[in-house]
Amino acid sequence: PDQAHWADITSPQGRYLQYQADLTSSDTGLTPLLEAVTASYNVQINPTPTNTPLPPTATNTATATATPLPPTATNTPLPPTATNTPLPGPTATATNTPPASSSFYQTSLSEFNSCGIGTNIFVANEFGGEVRLRAGLEDYFEGSSLDTSRWVNAGGSISVSNGMVQVVSGSPARIRSVNTYTQRTFEGRLRFTAANQELAGYSNFAGTWIVIGTRTDLNANRVYGWSSSGGSEQITELTGIDPFVFHDYRIVWGTNSIEYWVDGVLVATQNRTISAAMNVHLTNWTGTGSNTLAAEWLRVADYPASGEFSSCTLDAGQSVSWTNVNWLSNAPSGTGLQAEVRSSSDGSSWSSWSGVSNGGAIGSPAGRYLQYRFNYSSSVSNQTARLDEIQVNFVAGPTPTPTNTALPPTATNTPLPATATPVPPTATNTPVGPTATNTPLPPTPTNTPLPPTATLLPPTATNTATATATPLPPTATNTPLPATATPTGGSSLTHTSLTDFGSCGPLSGVSLTNMVDGEIRLAAALEDYFNGTTVNSQLWTIAQPNGGYTVQPVVANGLVTFDGGGLRSAQNFSGNVRVFESRARLGDPDTGFGDIGFGGNGSQPPADTTRLFLTNSSRVLQTNTRDGSVITRTNFSQFDVNQFHDYRIVARQNQTEFYVDGA
């Protein structure tokens, strides 16, 4: 939308945003990966004015009433003459200007932490900033050193940086909690390597422990749940878990059972009773500096029954109408989250707290200031509700502009001068003398005009204008009510897939790859992800090892497969350090001698220059180097060559390093 406010970004608001990622590396064999970008924003929907008819305006319509006059001189009024009589003073009407709509939006660690206060509350950084009940122990490793109020460095080299703790080197290297815990829930976001006994969980370091970790003596590519008490051990493989990437691990230590959870899924249960008090710890038994056990955060999920978080005072800068509030939260079963708000005109005298629902209207009166608070509850000791983001919306009303509104003309009587109307002559009898018969003659009518009698009536006596209210239908003079801005919650745009990144972004010195479903990395000297249907002849030459078998490699579904054939690079690589990487499956039950790595430039590697991973005649993974007549072979039976692995060869002038799945 046009008025998008981009969260945590200093660029001004606007409809469009562009990001640029600069990738650097001081090691020619390593590259950073850009795997996902999310840009968050919030916005108000533009208000739509609506006409709300005003009540009808009463207009005086003069109704003439006739008063009959006798046939004498009468005052004959003219029809009323309409004259405009303006009302005194201007009539204030609001102009059709949408009110200023805006909002307060809080979602980050700094926004929640800036001045909010709480009881039994912790502002965490598991998801970039969220408010939750305070755990018995929790650390998100935001600093540059170990927090000694929580942890003890129990040996070895420990590194804290970039929101991560790494247990680097030592035998063992370890951190442990200051306090001990009994039958509580441990949680952590962890990444292991292929070193033996990288462990996280509980221990009293005297024969009792409950941990998640590696056991390379069993399988270097697996994670295990491992508990011990009174000399009795139980060890359970956590099936399907890749130890070499970060996962959310959870140990629910109950009265008679131990549950192991990974990424929110229960994967194993051990039925046993352990009641000894133990420390939380991270332990790397054989830390060499290259195999580092890492954690982004650690917690003992032991929460109080209630808590309260009150926000900073939100200042709108003027008196506003507080409209509604939206938030994003997570409340597992047995937990609760209730919101309340209050407002103030001066920041010191406040209205009472009133409850508000998510997306519901704010009942607090208009004012310059607002504060919200959340009341937390939990009837499950190892669960808490979580507030992730909140948006409080308000509207600043318009200031009325005085305008003169002319009323319809008011009828008034303007009397004319009286008009004299002559009265008809009045007949009179004049007697004459009697005749002999003394028979009276009939009267002889004579007209004796009388002077006219001017009878002037009062000017208003005959025409009294009666004002009656005739309602008019609403007209265009009705002033629309201010439009109401409908707020939207926070939203975001995310790029994470091959399609997202590849849609239009220009690339310079970087490659868009598909190792983990779309990522941007520094461009390699040679790289191919086999997304087409044929071998790229600019990169590869088709080779037939041992000279005789001619089955062509097949490219399909993001794979290249071989059956007695091979590929060699069109380019020859040399230098002090050369790094080869591949995700490959070197064999299946019917295949042997699958080779990958560096060789000569012939149809098959010459015997004096090879750096290879291969499967031997027994179908066991082998590292193989040849320098003239010196051949070094090492077998690694713990790797299942029927499965895909990430292989890496770092060929130096006087040393070659072989890595499998990062170790």
Image (cartoon, grey):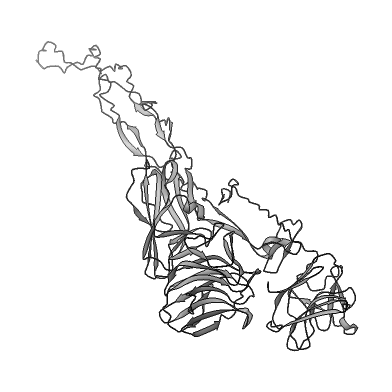
Please indicate whether residue 20 sits to the left or right of residue 320 in the image. Answer: right
* Front-lying residue, 327 or 433: 327
Q: Position of residue 185 (x, y in %)?
A: 45, 72
Quadrant of the image containing the C terminus = bottom right
Q: Position of residue 460 (x, y in %)?
A: 27, 23
Which residue: 59% across, 59% down?
A: 161
User: Can the viewer see residue 361 in this picture?
Assistant: no
Q: Position of residue 504 (x, y in %)?
A: 71, 57
Please indicate whether residue 246 sits to the left or right of residue 459 in the image. Answer: right
In the rendered image of this protein, does residue 96 appear above or below residue 508?
above
Which residue: 87% across, 68% down?
A: 572
User: Can the viewer see residue 633 in this picture?
Assistant: yes
Q: Position of residue 354 (x, y in %)?
A: 34, 53
Q: How many marks?
A: 0
In the rendered image of this protein, does residue 151 appear above or below residue 625?
above
The image quarter containing residue 68 is top left
The image quarter containing residue 640 is bottom right
* Front-lying residue, 291 or 187: 291
* Front-lying residue, 216 or 603: 216
